Amino acid sequence: MGVREAIACVEGRLHPFSAQVLQFYLAGHLSTGEFLRWFHMPNSSYLPLGVCIVSHLAPGYVPGTNQPEILNAPIRCPQPGPDCLI
């Protein structure tokens, strides 16, 4: 599987932002996680399309891996107290 199969997932024209994100991903400038995070931003219906593309280009990808450490850091409440749900 490869780029040809991944591009076959794209039917019709993409929003320019998503097209640019796809170009960055294909060029190796984005990780798979970053691609999935940004590709669907202008159009949530692109979520399954992004998964389709990734299934061809990175079939072993496991969601949630290779994320920046900051994403795993605890979130501090601005005003800790009984109403703090974070």
Image: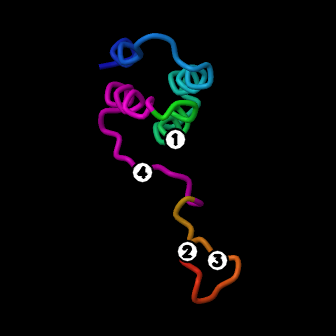
Q: What residue did someone put label 2 on?
A: 86
> Farthest residue toward the bottom?
82
Q: Between label 2 and label 1, give the one nearer the viewer.
A: 2
Give the mark nearest the N terminus, 3 or 2.
3
Which residue is nearer to you in this view: 23 or 40?
40
Report the amino acid beneath label 1: Arg
Tag 3: Cα neighbours inside 10 Å, few (<14), some, or many (≥20)? Answer: few
Under mark 2, the amino acid is: Ile
Q: Residues within 10 Å of mark 1 (few under 14, many from 20)?
A: few
Measured Cα–Cα span from mark 4 to mark 3: 26 Å
- Identify residue for label 3: 77
**From the viewer's perspective, is the residue at label 4 or at label 1 nearer?**
1
Which residue, given by chain and number where applicable, does mark 1 sit on? 37
Residue 59 falls inside the magenta stretch: yes
What residue sits 54% from the left and 77% below the top? 85
Q: Is residue 65 left or right of residue 28?
A: left
Under mark 4, the amino acid is: Thr
Viewed as shown, does residue 49 lie left or right of 59?
right
Q: Which mark is residue 80?
A: none
Q: Position of residue 73 (x, y in %)?
A: 56, 67
Residue 54 sits above or below residue 84 on the image:
above
Q: CA distance from mark 1 to mark 3?
A: 25 Å
Give whichever of discs 4 and 3 has the lower sequence position: 4
Q: Which residue lies at the image location 58% right of the left edge and 83% below the top edge?
A: 83
